[in-house]
Amino acid sequence: MGSSPTSAPHIQHHVAGDHHDEHDHHDQHWLFKYVFSQDHKWIAKQFLISGIVWAFIGATLSTLFRIQLGWPDAQLTWLEPLLGRWVEGGKLNPEFYLALVTMHGTIMVFFVLTAGLSGTFSNFLIPLQIGARDMASGFMNMLSFWFFFLAGIIMFVSLFLETGPASAGWTIYPPLSALPQAIPGSGAGQTLWLVSMALFIVSQLLGGVNYITTIINLRTAGMSMAKLPLTIWSFFLTAILGLLSFPVLFSAALLLIFDRSFGTSFFLSDIYIGGEALNHVGGSPILFQHLFWFLGHPEVYIVIMPAMGIVSEVMATNARKPIFGYRAMIGSLIGISLLSFVVWAHHMFVTGMNPFLGSVFMFLTLIIAVPSAVKTFNWLATLWRGNIRFTAAMLFAIGFVSLFVSGGLTGIILGNAALDIQMHNTYFVVAHFHLVMGSSAFFGMFAGVYHWFPKMFGRMMDEKLGYVHFWLTILAAYLVFLPMHYVGIAGFPRRYYAYTAYETFNQFGDLNTFISIAAIMAFFAQFIFLFNFIYSIFRGRRATENPWNSNTLEWTTPVEPGHGNWPGAIPAVYRWPYDYSKPGAEQDFIPQHIPYSQTVSSNLPYEKEME
């Protein structure tokens, strides 16, 4: 491929990693090849399949509580074989409803949208797109998955406890989470929740250290930071966010365990149960909220930034245009990352904080809309007058932008302290974060799966089934969450398991039923994806080496790369990853590893100096 270009710093080829060749991998025992694999691609598949399993568990729980909310007076005796004593006399137990909401939120935010999304695509794409044989530490990478898997097993076991799983909400606010005697779900279920989350955080920290180290140290020759795909920038900054914020949640969980088991009072004070005072003095539940949301708000971007990177890559590839404002996109990602650490208390406007402090957090919250708007405008400009190919991945990428904008606009409303105080405990907040974080992140994940499935499994997913999956899912998402904004503005409170006792809310009964029907439709639409995914792994049309005519390095590997990714030397990089539809070029794409000397007819004036 020749020497590295003079325009890029010379980065040593990591030949030391060449011993991870395909032959060695084939000689491995199946246990170390498929179960305790240290190949980043296989670990990515483990994260993906685990995330899909957890997504269906989380969606099942949400379907159960939407049935309760949509038909609060119906007899649910048909659920008794599934839920046992949690359905008594055909009615869902109110405490179990809280457990369903708690576990749904925990599973979706952490086990699916954090581990499933970032764990899959960071693992799969970082070495392939920067030109590395594998992660910096294959062993740490393997440990990262198995800590996550163990955390998942413990969380799953908690669903079957006699007293029920954790019931304090996915934010586990004290005192419900700090007093084992508060409600049944505050007992063993809450303990297992805390143990599971501690293991989950260890998994995320192991993964984050690995991602950062790999990106900094193992880039191929010519791959400067200014030539990284936006996917890698998003994974890099996501890992930094996780590395700085997850330890704070770990400390909060540890102090909570102390309060629960050792009689301390970090988060408890002046608690009475049955008229009797407990021996807890001096603690503050507000302190826990500060610790939780210091992780909780960066967590929003830990979830959404990998999806942003995926969407940027998919959109540029399928619009056949360079991404608009590459440096502005990187700057906006960095801006989001920095600001995400100083806005956490906008979740706490209702805690009685000093109004001046509230105004500071309100100001910072509204500022964070600026880099998000930059990204949105750049995505739209990338689409503008592009030669768009409406693949399934492209549809989900465009759907991501739609949902991100829709949900983000309501975030500006909730960022205003005076409005948030009125709507904080209503369905308006539920609708907002499900659109901007939940649904849009899922759309980013689907875009990534459809786009990189050929590189993961060597086969193509069925595009027509992908179209059906997309249209049913985006229709259902809007039919669920747009009405929720309306009932939220009307004061419809969240976390109530039935509204029939309140005459004020009876007028929304039909709308609540409509939302539940749409939610059930969204749930069953995902079985189309599941069938397409599983069927395509074994029977899908065989993929070519570069089915999307993309520029990034992963498409220079064999159709199904072995352990080590490239059978020969790793390609050097000469150009940025978005040379699409370049005037004068023979094709509408020029991969990163093609030297400028081979594209004389399309070189710009400054590029001619790099030949």
Image (cartoon, helix red, strand yellow):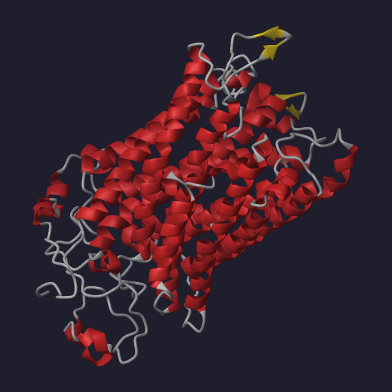
Q: Quadrant of the C terminus?
A: bottom left
Q: Measured from the top left, where is residue 237 in percent x and y?
A: 37, 53
- Residue 148 versus residue 413: which sits nearer the camera? 413
Q: Is residue 181 visible?
A: yes
- Residue 11 versus residue 312: which sits nearer the camera? 11
- Residue 227 versus residue 345: which sits nearer the camera? 345
Q: Is residue 74 left or right of residue 398?
A: right
Q: Is residue 534 above or below residue 259?
A: below
Q: Is residue 113 above or below residue 72?
A: below
What residue sits 73% from the left and 46% below the top?
Answer: 423
Q: Is residue 546 left or right of residue 262?
A: left
- Label tally: 0
What residue sits 48% from the left and 79% below the top?
Answer: 388
Give the residue furthest to the front: 356
Q: Is residue 449 visible?
A: no
Q: Quadrant of the N terminus?
A: bottom left
Q: Measured from the top left, where is residue 19 in percent x and y?
A: 9, 51
Q: Measured from the top left, where is residue 39 in percent x and y?
A: 24, 48
- Residue 105 versus residue 535: which sits nearer the camera? 105
Q: Is residue 33 left or right of residue 173?
A: left
What residue sits 18% from the left and 63% below the top?
Answer: 220
What residue sits 57% from the left and 35% below the top?
Answer: 170
Q: Is residue 285 left or right of residue 421?
A: left
Q: Is residue 57 above or below residue 84?
A: below
Q: Measured from the top left, where is residue 303 in percent x and y?
A: 47, 50
